[in-house]
Amino acid sequence: MTGTRVHTAPWVLTGTRAIRHGAVAVTGSRIAEVGSVDELRSAGEVVEWSGTLIPGLVNAYTHLQYTHMAALGQSSYDSFEAWSTAFEAEYSRRGDWRASAELGLEAAIRSGTTAIGDVVTHAEALNVLSAGRMHGIAYWEVMAWHDTDWSERGRQETLAVLAQATGPVGLSPHAPYSLDTGVLDDLGRLARELGLRSHVHVAESSAEHDYIADGAGPLAEQWRAWGHGEFALLRGGGAAVRPVIYADTLGVLGAHTHIAHGIYVDADDRARLRDTGTVVALCPRSNEVLGLDAAPVADYLREGNPIAVGTDSLSSSPSVDVLADVAALHRIARDQGYTAPDLHARLFTAATAGGAAAMGLGDEFGTLTAGKLADITVLGIEESTAADTLAAIVEAGEGSAVATIIDGETRFVRTAVSAQR
Ligand SMILES: [Zn+2]
């Protein structure tokens, strides 16, 4: 076979099985075959890696364009509202969002990421994923619109930005509290009409509940102070329901949507997320930086909610290394009493196939399977058994990426020099 490369390593974890001395044959941008080195060595030019080959890591939720705001994510906060005040001040001082996003993209590739759910707030950063030949979706974020402004010009302006996309694009109503009720309703309809994937921040702050249910509390006061007192919920004393239910009532949730955070959710909320097929991207390190509680990771796992992993942006997290958040989720699940033996496998899946499913791209990537895109991450981790190798990846995989292959093309290889950085 001509033009085929056979990537081999002491371990290959495909996402469904572990292969000792495994191999992934790649032809063009696709995986041709997966098997043992013995089976595949004659299929093409052999590339020998040490460590473990895994499906490319999927960062289901970040904002690459906030990479220049990394100083914020290196700090810590008492509350979501304290962080968002600091964020707004820093955001208004910043510019050159494209360069900032490009820097974030490079960091993501260096940490083994091959697909990203990137939430974008400036049109100049919209096409950074596609220009950088990164898989995933650029979600155009819509925020702080009142019903009347939205129907007069917001909808039109949003459609104009979406039309500029050179790659896969989605629609992100920012959050249940940051848009007027009619706008949320219209965005849910618009995503379905245009056949776009959606992303929304839900249940991130404990005060979000008081805002949505009663139009009261610190988050409601912050949005009133920012001049949004005309929002229907702030005028009318809330919707008398929890944020997840409110978002679902307006058509924002569904199998085309994934949410970020999902911290302050009860059993009914989690059931609603499952029933609607909404994936939850968990972002534990960002939550910790903001002084928030941990998401109910153990409950999500026990109850069978579809989950993915997001790093969030550097404005609220120390890095875009997905495996650092996987390790945090492992600690949290154990602390919350999750003792089932499938924990490592579940979290590994969340960071790969789970992220692909969150963006509706599970047929394209997320496992090492013949026919899927050749998105492969090489980790410098090798233990004597498959179980120990998987455990080391999940519990201590941060910083272990030694190579990143996207579409069959090796985009990053750690050298002795880059390892010292
Ligand atoms: Zn966000």
Image (cartoon, helix red, strand yellow):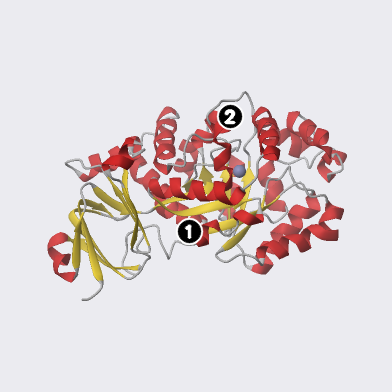
Considering every residue shown, the one lying at the far bottom of the view is: 1
> In the rendered image of this protein, does residue 44 appear above or below residue 118?
below
Quadrant of residue 195 within the rendered picture? bottom right
Q: Quadrant of the N terminus?
A: bottom left
Reading the image, the residue beneath label 1 is: 132
For residue 292, the mark is 2
Residue beneath the point at 75% across and 28% down: 218
Task: Name the side, left or right, on which 291 lies relative to 150.
Answer: left
Secondary-structure class at tag 1: loop
Residue beneath the point at 66% across and 52% down: 122
Q: Is label 2's Cβ within 8 Å of ligand 1? A: no
Q: Is label 1's Cβ within 8 Å of ligand 1? A: no
Secondary-structure class at tag 2: loop
Quadrant of residue 196 within the rendered picture? bottom right
> In the rendered image of this protein, does residue 193 appear above or below residue 208?
below
Q: Earlier in the sequence, mark 1 or mark 2?
A: 1
Q: Position of residue 309 (x, y in %)?
A: 47, 45
Tag 1: amino acid: Gly
Considering every residue shown, the one lying at the far top of the view is: 78
Q: Position of residue 100 (x, y in %)?
A: 56, 46
> In the rendered image of this protein, does residue 227 appear above or below residue 406?
above
In three-dimensional space, the C-alpha distance between marks 1 and 2, rounded to whole angstroms, equals 33 Å
In front of the other: 43 or 200? 43
Q: Position of residue 263 (x, y in %)?
A: 57, 36
Tag 2: amino acid: Leu
Q: Is residue 235 visible?
A: yes
